[in-house]
Amino acid sequence: MLALNLSPDVFALVYLVATVFFILGLKGLSSPRTALKGNRNAMIGMLLAVLATLVHPDVQDYTWILAGLGLGAVVGIAVALRIQMTAMPQLVAALHSFVGLAAVFIAAGTFYGHSASGQEMDTAILIEIAAGSFIGAITFTGSLVAFGKLQELLSSNPLVFKGQHWLNLLLGVAMLGFAAQFAITLDPLPFWIMTGIALLLGFLLVLPIGGADMPVVVSMLNSYSGWAAAATGFTLNNHLLITTGALVGSSGAILSYIMCKAMNRSIVSVILGGFGGEASAQAAAGPAKGIKSASVEDAAFMLENSGKVIIVPGYGMAVAQAQHAMKELVHTLGKKGVEVKFAIHPVAGRMPGHMNVLLAESDIPYDIVFEMEDINSDFSGCDVALVVGANDVVNPAAKTDKSSPLYGMPILDAYKAKQVFVIKRSMKAGYAGVDNALFYHDNCSLVFGDAKAVCENLVKTFEAS
């Protein structure tokens, strides 16, 4: 038996210290420069929390705990070693689903455990059990849908039908009604009906979200998982779960709000599963216009003779794993006296910070990586904008075409550069399924090919010249 007969104040103090480390972890994650330190602080906080919980006097049997820790460690290590950076958003969505499902299990286990032991449950704890279950259930199925869309097991197009919002509203009211009935009567049937409705709502709230808006959904589901953990903390009377859940929930909500502002979307619509639903996917074929294609040699000549180049990375760069080749390209251009900067859109990739992580992985200096609001004004004075695997985030239709699903979303103004080169595998539309008006601008040329191969060939062309 590992349990220690310590004062409750000692455990409260350890949990407080762990919470401080979590806060420091979140603060560190606010910048790529301090992200590694932030992760370390969060890991220290989690280690303190786990160790303190294991030696708590309330823990009487370690059999299932050790079995869960062992299985989780094996699965976690295996996944961490094999996962590619391109699949990180899917992994995040999957982990959110685990948190949601755990909240449902804990809520049900607490209810049946109290019932079996004859412990009296007041209205407050029943409300906490109900809230933990339905928030967790919505998080679980909503995250599964997000995973399916990101993994392309499901269509990235919005799935909408007539009366969808009214159905969601009806289900939401019914869910809360059954939760209230459960809290009043202690009858398990309303609990399971409420949980079943919440599971269905999770599907219905995320299915109408279009692919281009998926980064915001992942962020919002992160917030939901935090609130589910906080509700579980109230159920278990665990102060650490309450505080950390609130930290995750509030930080996820704030990030979602910031991203919605960056996309000119409504945060209320995200929560209600509405935005993206009005926009039926446009045909990816696009208008019958001509495009200009360029060879690697053409692009290399323009880049080499430029004074200032801005690179816009996107999900295509992640798929091609071109970040290391990109570093070589930047290094080579720097030796030739070309000023190079990176422009990052808030929702580039499949989750917040996706591009920043990839660039940091290849040791690209932080001081040449800029967010959209800090660099957009530079495009008009830029000689070449090199778009590597990005699509929707540089689409001028977001500013000019009111019928476009992207209309109103702030974009990177790559089209204002003197010359634009877009590295792209094919003419396939971006994740939003929208034709990109940039490709038909007079100053834009497409370099077809794998992003990694094209960047490597650009470097070889420079070295041969």
Image (cartoon, grey):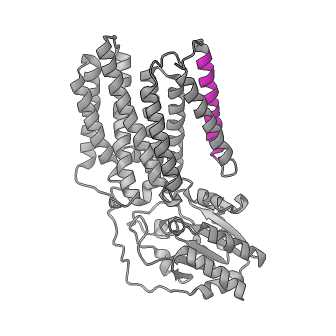
Residue 446: percent from the left, percent from the top?
A: 52, 81
Instruction: Compare residues 108 and 195 and report the one nearer the observer.
Output: 108
Please determine whether, in this image, residue 341 is positioned above or below residue 56. Answer: below
Q: Is residue 399 left or right of residue 168?
A: right
Q: Main secondary structure of the magenta part?
A: helix
- Residue 361: percent from the left, percent from the top? 63, 59
Q: Is residue 45 above or below residue 154?
A: above
Q: Decide which of 242, 63 is in the foreground and name it.
A: 63
Q: Is residue 67 above or below residue 6?
A: below
The segment highlighted magenta reads 10-30
Q: Quadrant of residue 456?
A: bottom right
List x then y, in percent, for residue 412: 57, 65
Q: Is residue 144 magenta?
A: no
In terms of image quadrants, where is residue 209?
bottom left
User: Does 163 sit left or right of 297 as displayed?
Assistant: left
- Residue at point 54% right, 31% down? 244
Give me the residue at 36% from left, 22% from top.
Answer: 110
Task: Work out whether residue 380 or residue 356 is closer to the camera in this orientation and state it.
Answer: 356
Total marks drawn?
Answer: 0
Residue 342 visible? The answer is yes
Residue 419 image offset from top left, x and y in percent: 61, 80
- Compared across the picture, whether 333 is left or right of 111 comes to right
Q: In the rendered view, tell whether residue 405 sits above or below residue 100.
A: below
Residue 265 visible (yes or no):
no
Q: Residue at x 28, y 46 (%)?
A: 165
Query: In the rendered view of the protein, which quadrant contains the C terminus?
Result: bottom right
